[in-house]
Image (cartoon, grey):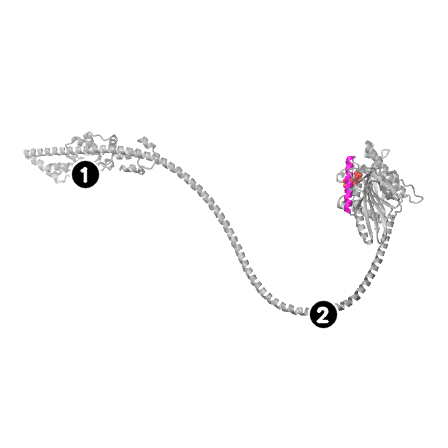
Amino acid sequence: MAEEQENIPPSSPPASRLPAPAKATGIPLPAGKPLAAATTVVGKRKSPTADLPPAKRLSGGGTTGIKPPAKARAAAAAAAPPTRPETRSSSRNGMRPATAAGARTAPARPPAATRPAARPPATRAPATKPAPKPATKTAPAKPPVAVRPRAGIGATAATARRPGAPSRPAARGSASSTQSSQDDPDKLREYMGDFGKTITDNIQALLEQERERLAALQGHRAEMQTTLLTAQSEEREARRALANASEEKAAMAARHTREVEDLERQLERREREKRALEDELARNLDELSRERAVARELRTELAEQARRHMGLNAQLTAAQAHATLLQAEVERAEIAVSASKAEAEGYRKRCEEADLGAEERIRLAQAECERRVAEIEDELRAAESIRRKLHNQVQELKGNIRVFARVRPALAHERDAPDGLADIAYCDERVAAETGQSHLTVRSRSESAMGKEREQAITFNFDKVFQPKHGQREVFEEISMLAQSVLDGYNVCIFAYGQTGSGKSWTMEGGEGLHAGMIPRAIDMIFAESAKLKDRGWTYAMEGSFLEVYNDEINDLLGSGQFDTKKHEIKIDKDKMTVTDTVSLPLANPAQVSSLLEKARSRRAVAATLMNERSSRSHSVFALKVRGWNDATGEESEGILNLVDLAGSERLASSGADKDAVRLKETININKSLSALADVISALGQGAGAAAAHVPYRNSTLTRLLQTSLSGSSKTLMLCNISPLAAHLGETVCSLRFATKVNSTPAGTARRNLK
Ligand SMILES: Nc1ncnc2c1ncn2[C@@H]1O[C@H](COP(=O)(O)OP(=O)(O)OP(=O)(O)O)[C@@H](O)[C@H]1O
């Protein structure tokens, strides 16, 4: 049983909460007490004889030989009242009515264990000490012997139960009867016989009573055992039910946990849904408020529209009234117009008469005007002729062969050149402008044969010196007059001369926009001026060609195919020069000239790729032929503008030609052609007529190509390009000497090609 109790989980419900079967037994279990205790209590359960005190029952058991169950005995021992020894002695005595009376009265007493501790122990009490209370209670069931009308016994019994009541009259009665019996032996014997019989009857009655009780106790014991078995089976049932209930509880707890989790998840979902709904509600509320605002605006607008509508209605009414008024006025006006028409008709007739006179006057005025215009045009043409003459005179005064020097700026990568920049000094620009002459001085340092360092300063005079700071615009300002001369029917030849990299191509072709060189600027100007001269009756037609002279041979830069392989011949007939098999393109506007230049440039680049780098080793000649005619005057003119980019003027050593046969041939040809050019210019400077020297045009292809442009009737300008680097100083001095030689040539007189 103890083991089973240990198996009960601590959380098991108290016995009082056990399921129904436990209750069905009708055995009340004390709340909060373990089942074992309850069982013990069951063992003590009140039987039909429960009114007997446990001590008495045990005592009876001991007398009858019926032993209660061991546990009952133990419980009885634990709960045995201290009166047991007394009881046992009484039982053994068996003859003392006081003891019997005490035994009978015992059931009315409370259990000994519950008696107050202050009660004196029974062992110390006198054997005759009766039980204090219940004697009177049991009396009605079986009248004690003591109450029989026999005075002696009654007195004895009363004395035995209540020894402490000496004042009772029964005691006194007993004493007097003892006295009388001593006096009368027969009475005494009779008394004793009666007494013995009574005693025997009483004992018999008591025995009978005890037997009945024993039988009742045995029946009760069997009943108790049955009840115990039933209780045990019920207990097992209860335990099974408890285990089932525990399992069920655990399952329920798990289910409950799952349900709680499900509910929590549902709760979270609901929370989320709630939040989403709240958000949506907020949005809807926002939208609603916006809608309301829109509705308010619409209502306001509607009210405004209604107000306006009413206003318009009022205006319409007013306008209709006004229209009615106007209608009446129009009708009046129509009448007035009819009257005016009639009046106008009268005026028209008078005007026609006046027009006839006016037309005559206008015709006369127009004739006068035309006469004046003709006079003015004649004056203009005369002025134009004078301008041309003056212009030519200015050019003549300036010289038909003019030389400019131009020093280019040092390029970014040249500023840190090891030898630095050459020491070149320029004259004062104001002095140069006043005198029309300018110069530059080049200083060089060299060692003499004696090992002395000597400084040499060479000054070169030119018509104009352009410093590195001067741009393309300033250079062209000095050249523009020559370009104008082409329109006037003069041949103009502009050379760019100098060593490789000195800025010849930059000067002639230049870059974009502000950096445009002399060729595009001259072309633009010629087209612009020809357009202006249209007012004075002049019409111009232009065509261009672009040739290259390389190793004294001509290549057409505008020809077909990638590279010109044709053999070209120069033919001159009566001051008219032509080159066979070359292309001359008509040019109607500057854009066409630009595309022509671009084509020539690209072909030159291809040629350079196929035959080494030769752009600086060849002369390029762009020729713009300008033919003009004046329908008013019948005048005609033809001029050619030659813009020549000469090959680099390097000396043999510095060109590296001494190590390379191709370069040697190039250099020889370049020097030959440049020398021939110098000779031609020199010869031209010696004047025309009888004293005129032979001009050696035929000494080189270049001079022959430029023959018509260099002859006495042309205007020539040489631009000597100079590098600013000290490393190029030797070549610079050579170029400047060559340019000075050209510049020192006496100028001839240019001739205008008029027909
Ligand atoms: N006045 C200038 N201002 C700015 N840059 C210049 C000027 N003159 C020349 N240059 C630059 O100097 C470099 C050499 O000039 P360019 O090619 O005109 O020399 P070149 O004498 O024609 O040479 P090549 O004989 O090889 O054709 C070019 O990069 C050019 O842009």
Q: Which residues are magenta?
A: 590-610
Residue name at image x 69 percent, y 69 percent: 338
Residue 90 placement (x, y as % from top left)? 17, 32
Q: Is residue 688 magenta?
A: no
Q: Is residue 598 magenta?
A: yes
Is the C-beta of the residue carrying label 2 under 8 Å from the nearest atom of ligand 1? Answer: no
Q: Quadrant of residue 341?
A: bottom right
Q: Is residue 204 above or below residue 477?
A: above
Label 1 neighbourhood size at 10 Å, few (<14), some (14-19), many (20+)?
Answer: some
Q: Amino acid at mark 1?
A: Pro
Magenta span: helix, strand or loop, mainly? helix
Q: Amino acid at mark 2?
A: Glu
Residue 657 placement (x, y as % from top left)? 82, 33
| Badge 1 element | loop
Residue 750 placement (x, y as % from top left)? 88, 47
Question: Which residue in the protein does label 1 denote?
Answer: 134
In the image, 625 versus 706, the foreground residue is 625
Q: Quadrant of the N terminus?
A: top left
Q: Is residue 232 above or below residue 494?
A: above
Give me the C-alpha separation between circle 1 and circle 2. 168 Å
